[in-house]
Image: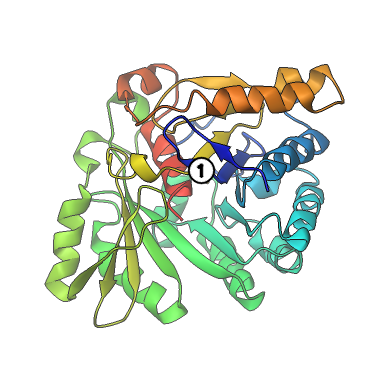
Amino acid sequence: MQTLTDPFARAISYLRVSVTDRCDFRCSYCMSEHMTFLPKAELLTLEELDRLCSRFIALGMTKLRVTGGEPLVRKGILTFFEAMSRHLASGALRELTLTTNGSQLSKFAAPLAALGVRRVNVSLDTLDADKFARITRWGRLPQVLEGIAAARAAGLRVKINAVALKGFNEDELTSLTDWCAREGHDLTFIEVMPMGDDMGEALRLDQYWPLKDLRARLAQRFTLTELDQRTGGPARYVRLNETGQTIGFITPLTHNFCESCNRVRLTCTGQLYMCLGQEDMADLRAPLRSSPDDAALEAAIHAAIARKPKGHDFDYSRRVSDGKLSGQITRHMSHTGG
Ligand code: SF4
């Protein structure tokens, strides 16, 4: 089998693919309430996404994580999962997974499980219905909890990704942890760093909650054992000895995983980002659309991987001026964590 190897001898085997920029929530650290989404012609069609991902898989990608926006609001999305499931069946793809806000899982969990999805990451910051409605603006907690229950009923393993916000879910550290222990969900906390006015009313500078503080708080109640569990991503893990739970921590500024980085990120418009923390990207849509033959596309993929940088270099000011908020960056980071 072919492999994609970058100039630093890292085998690139994990593709995160965004299938839409749309979402049915408007989390205040991710989107403004009145978003202008991309025109349809800019988006890759589901057939194009299939062709592009299949080419990556032929080149050695063994793990595919589907993201958004909210991936399950993309019309016809099961067609795409069905297309990818043929690579699971052939053995070329080892894992097909997704990151979701959970709103559509009641409907999609069973079909996704039938297509070979085994794990799902659900972004959930609070178990308080009012707070949930406030931070997601358009989301409703019961719908998400039903979705998570449907995922478990369908046999999917669930990982909860919670953004840690001081003064917002600080008081829920224990209840979230206990709930995950009871329900058998994995849990990862994500640090988010607000950077000024663009962050919207629900995420202010005084809401920055460094994960080292959260961790210290957890240690008051639990005995933490550091785990050497590496996924090639930014998450660090501990075990809570009392419950046996594994808890992940992701901070967007960590540089500890670059040397083992195995991943790249594809946007819904066909741009390939070779590093989560750098702006350099390669347009794969043009070679994809220029010919039904994959030769130009494959050459563009190889050329892009040859530009994968050694390490990342977050420049928050640049992201904010682009209108991309750190919450979104952080969600992206979390999508790489497992
Ligand atoms: S954080 Fe996730 S659920 Fe919230 S608006 Fe952004 S994409 Fe949607």
In the rendered image, residue 269, in percent from the top left (x then y), is placed at 66, 26
Badge 1 amino acid: Ala
- Left or right of 279? Residue 153 is right
x 32%, y 80%: residue: 244
Q: Residues within 10 Å of mark 1 (few under 14, many from 20)?
A: some
Q: Residue at x 61, y 27 (%)?
A: 302
- Image spot of residue 54 (x, y percent): 75, 42
The part of the image, by quadrant, that contains residue 90 is bottom right
Q: Nearer the viewer, residue 209 or 64?
A: 64
Residue 299 visible from this viewpoint: yes
Left or right: where 304 falls relative to 56 = left
- Which residue does the image show at 55% across and 52% down from the upper left? 99
Secondary structure category for the residue under label 1: strand
**Image quadrant assignment for residue 226:** bottom left
| Horizontal side of residue 213 vs 319, given as left or right | left
Query: Left of 85 or right of it: where is 26?
Result: left
Is residue 37 among the parts visible in the rendering?
no
Residue at image position (57%, 52%) is: 100
In the foreground, 237 or 58: 58
The residue closer to the viewer here, 33 or 153, is 153
- Residue 200, image quadrant: top left
Image: 92 above or below 110: above
Q: From what the image shows, is residue 185 above or below residue 259?
A: below
Residue 97 image offset from top left, x and y in percent: 61, 56
The answer to whether the residue bearing label 1 lies less than 8 angstroms from the nearest atom of ligand 1 is no
Identify the image's colour scheme: rainbow, by chain, secondary structure or one colour. rainbow
Q: Which residue is mark 1?
A: 11
Image vertical order of residue 143 relative to residue 320, above or below: below
Q: Is residue 133 above or below residue 218?
A: above
Query: In front here: 23 or 63?
Result: 63
User: Residue 284: x percent and y percent?
Assistant: 67, 23
